[in-house]
Amino acid sequence: MMTFSNYLFNILIVCYLFIYIGSFSICHDITNDEKTNEIFSKYLGKGYDILFGYPLPNNELIDDPGFKEVIIDTQLSIDNISNYICKKEEYVDVIEDINDIGYLGMQKINIDDLDNRIKPFSASMPYKSYFADLEIKKKKYALAQNMCVLNYATYDLKESGKNINKDFVLDIEKLPILTKNQMKLCTKVLYMNNNLHCSEGIKSWMKFFEKYGTHVVLSAHFGGMSFNTMEITKRKIEEIKIYKYKYSLWNNPYLNIFKSGSLFQDLSINVDDHKENKKNNSNNNINIDEKKKSDAYIKNDVLIEQYRDNINLEIRGGNNFDEKWKNLTYIVWKNSIYSNIVPIHLDLYSLNTFMLIEKKESYDMALLFYNNLYGIDNENFYLSQDITDVLSEGKQITGSNKGSLILSCPVGYIKSTGLIFVYDSSEKLKTNKSKDPKIKIYPCTNKGQYDIACSYITKKKNIITFGWIYCVKHNFIKFETIYQNNDNIIYKDGKTFMSLTCTEGNTIAFGFKMKLKKLEKLEKLKIKPCTIGDDQCTINNIKRNSDYLLWGFCVPSSFRSLSSLQLTYIHDDTIQNDIRGACSDVYINKYDNIFLGFTFSFDNRFEQVKTEPCESQSKYCFHIIPKKKKMYYVGMFLLCRFDGNTNRKFTYK
């Protein structure tokens, strides 16, 4: 199945060569019929985008979205070979990961000298869908393909000089020469933020690709193809690999091969056999063999109904007919291809064919950037998600202690961001003239692929610590941790202030500012959240009689829904029983959930210090008091949907 397209391509090339040497024994004559050429010229000579194109069948895409504007007018200069070659799949195959989809797609195009870092079709809608299913949800599929080729049409590039699109030539002349330094300064994260380094160079190349694509189509095979898939278990995949003959399709007359009851039953997840066993053990006189046969039909009907949504049949070329077209026989569909032929294998040539040498290098750099910008991989997939979905997949770890504190991520996760709050309760600091601050923030930053812990080590007995870290599964999700302690005060134009600023392209997703007067106890701590979606958080009017802290983490602004969030802080220093906090007084739907957060508490003697994470995507965040009827200060950070910064209060459980 996987090598058929290449095999077919080689056969047709041989036929093409035979024609030139006068042999017409296998192939039909070369024709140049104007009416037929209208079909071929719809595609030949057009630009093609190898990232957004999708040559595999997909019912939601009537035409391959990779085709762009006309580069060469080919209508009067097309040669085509009429030939009829059909290949019906013989066995079920498997799709285990996104590389299988990429491999299948590459069987439908022919490109010379493509950089192996570039992944064709990886920006297309179907590819994204498969990526989510295969790489994120870990689904597996059984697969069968059918293909029919009716024509091979080609255009001689030597004719392009008199037929080339003049606007295309002018647009090439306007393209700037790119430098490696520009590429370093213009990253995919910064590209959408009007970065000058991008605007002056790389953006014009991106617009060029969006208009003309990345390659040009100079020849293609025309016909029709089908792509039949069904979700199956990993166990079934192993079985198919070993016993492939068991799932032979040669005698299956339907285009939708999973219409076959026995095949469907063999490949599907097993239905619970409890009812069948119960019936077989009942006291009746029905012949056991007949009963098993009857139950098998019932079981198959149940499977078909239960797993109908797991079956998918995509076609390109031929007629869809009506709502029942999925039940068509293979023969009916094959015969319908004559009236609706489409390109099913493309021969692509790089657009740098039309460029001078100095621009060829720029083309290569720009194409790789285009791939990194739009092509879907694990990193790009997450960077385009809703921030609330991304945050809910991480793990929040909290801890507290008198003295040193160590926080560690669970197995399979690495540290992304976090903090350890440090309070010095020693008597020597309780003066207004003390230079040493009573409160400090120790940031928990990601230091590498295997960084899983954050620690604060001290031998002092009067140090109170509590902390929170956020852990992620993927090492590319490195949120930017930013912080300022009391020694980072800025004096400018007679004003004193402290400020946090995200790097360009990032925005604050969680952050707060703290203030504590030197002569006051910790329960008088003042905390205000930073504005989510801003790239800066500032404390103005710094005074010498107080200690100040700033902490937060920034995320790429490509994440969706950042501007719709706010950080809420709830506190009370008179808590004596278990309490809970919420994002909304009236819960309506999931958007009133807590997306992220943690809570902490301490008594006035610091005998009990406690920190707890808030469960993500939950209605409430709970805090359990260590000793009932004892007075505690409780603080709670909740990342919620924006509600106008309404003041929230705790409620009792």
Image: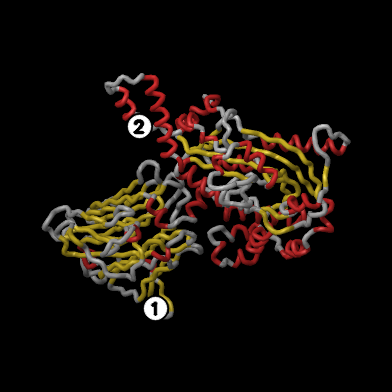
Q: Nearer the viewer, mark 2 or mark 1?
A: 2
Query: Can you give x and y, in whole percent of width and height, for residue 35 in the image?
Result: 78, 52
Query: In the picture, residue 643 is in which quadrant?
Result: bottom left
Query: Can you give x and y, in whole percent of width and height, for residue 628 in the image?
Result: 12, 55
- Dot 2 or dot 1: first in sequence order is 2
Which of the pair 257/114 is nearer the observer? 257
Which of the pair 222/238 is nearer the observer? 222
* Quarter of the image that includes the N terminus: top right
Residue 352 visible in rendering: no
Q: Secondary structure at mark 1?
A: strand
Looking at the picture, which amino acid does disc 1 mark?
Answer: Lys
Asked if marks 2 and 1 touch (Cβ < 8 Å), the reply is: no
The crowd level at tag 2 (other Cα within 10 Å; few <14, some 14-19, many 20+) is: few
Alpha carbon distance from label 2 to label 1? 73 Å
Which of the pair 431/332 is nearer the observer? 332
Going 60% across and 30% down the picture, which residue do you hit?
A: 90
Residue behind mark 2 = 272
Question: In this rendering, would 162 be left or right of 177?
Answer: right
Q: Secondary structure at mark 2?
A: loop
652 in relation to 131, above or below = below
Query: Can you give x and y, in whole percent of width and height, for residue 288 in the image?
Result: 36, 19
Query: Can you give x and y, in whole percent of width and height, for residue 432 in the image?
Result: 24, 71
Looking at the picture, which amino acid does disc 2 mark?
Answer: Asp
Residue behind mark 1 = 495
